[in-house]
Image: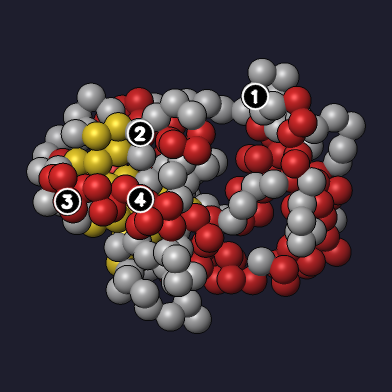
């Protein structure tokens, strides 16, 4: 997570949405950088509201606009699947061996997913304590120019991140039946992403607005 005081922005690091590239490109320009341990770098909006937002307000008089990126939910799971096959990636208990993508998706949809399939959801990441979306700007991973233009304008310099932390290729074909279960089980995820895409890749949120 990056905080820019003058630009009045906080950029959340939603996992599997290119956050590492933006961290590397912008950390030298940020006033506050949260990096390193995943639970710190990838602080959720709910945790931010509970712990970090009060600190920013009380210590620095800041209440920055909140910015986050989400991607197609199926591609989000594909990225997690590839990452958890990396020998130098996840912890041993989360590493995937000899498991097809269909089985991984079904495990991720379980009420209590096993460790290797715990991915969280993007909608939950960008929601506050009341369960409502609690960011001001949502960008689509698939429309990177929208985010770059926004950040460049607000920060006052050209933002051109390079691709980083790319997982090796893997067979992520999904059967129609499993994809149908995913789209049904995560309908709110797909709906939110579709709304961002329909807005041209940049959805300006009214904080606490109904999710549809």
Instruction: Name the residue tied to disc 1.
Output: 89
In this picture, residue 58 sits left or right of residue 131: left
- Pointer 4 with pointer 2, Cβ within 8 A: no
Q: Quadrant of residue 34?
A: top left
Q: Which mark is residue 34?
A: 2
Could you give the CA–CA distance between mark 2 and mark 3, rounded to whole angstroms?
A: 18 Å
Secondary element under disc 1, as helix, strand or loop, is loop
- Pointer 1 with pointer 4, Cβ within 8 A: no
Q: Residue at x 30, y 73 (%)?
A: 206
In this picture, residue 11 sits left or right of residue 105: left
Sort mark 1 into few (<14), some (14-19) or many (20+) by Cα contacts within 10 Å. Answer: some
Sort mark 3 into few (<14), some (14-19) or many (20+) by Cα contacts within 10 Å. Answer: few
Q: First in sequence, mark 1 or 4: give its number.
A: 4
Q: Position of residue 2 (x, y in %)?
A: 30, 38
Q: Position of residue 125 (x, y in %)?
A: 49, 55
Instruction: Name the residue tied to disc 3.
Output: 58
Q: Residue at x 30, y 32 (%)?
A: 33
- Indicate the quadrant containing the N terminus: top left, top right, bottom left or bottom right: top left
Which one is closest to the eye, mark 1 or mark 4? 4
Q: Residue at x 24, y 47 (%)?
A: 55
Sort mark 4 into few (<14), some (14-19) or many (20+) by Cα contacts within 10 Å. Answer: few
- Pointer 2 with pointer 3, Cβ within 8 A: no
Q: Quadrant of residue 128?
A: bottom left
Q: First in sequence, mark 1 or 3: give its number.
A: 3
- Of 144 and 128, nearer the camera is 128
Which one is closest to the eye, mark 1 or mark 3? 3
Instruction: Name the residue tied to disc 4.
Output: 51
């Amino acid at each position: 997570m990056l905080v820019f005081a003058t630009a009045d922005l906080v950029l959340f690091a939603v996992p599997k949405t290119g956050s590492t590239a933006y961290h590397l490109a912008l950390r030298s320009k940020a006033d506050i950088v949260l990096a390193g341990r995943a639970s710190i770098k990838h602080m959720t909006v709910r945790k931010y509201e509970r712990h970090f937002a009060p600190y920013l307000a009380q210590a620095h008089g800041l209440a920055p606009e909140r910015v986050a990126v989400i991607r197609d939910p199926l591609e989000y799971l594909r990225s997690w699947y590839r990452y958890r096959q990396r020998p130098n990636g996840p912890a041993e208990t989360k590493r995937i061996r000899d498991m097809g993508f269909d089985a991984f998706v079904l495990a991720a949809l379980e009420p209590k997913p096993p460790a290797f399939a715990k991915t969280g959801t993007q909608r939950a990441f960008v929601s506050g304590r009341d369960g409502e979306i609690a960011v001001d700007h949502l960008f689509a991973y698939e429309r990177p120019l929208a985010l770059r233009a926004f950040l460049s304008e607000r920060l006052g310099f050209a933002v051109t991140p390079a691709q980083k932390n790319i997982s090796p290729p893997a067979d992520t074909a999904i059967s129609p039946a499993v994809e149908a279960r995913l789209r049904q089980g995560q309908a709110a995820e797909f709906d939110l992403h579709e709304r961002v895409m329909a807005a041209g890749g940049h959805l300006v949120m009214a904080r606490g607005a109904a999710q549809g």
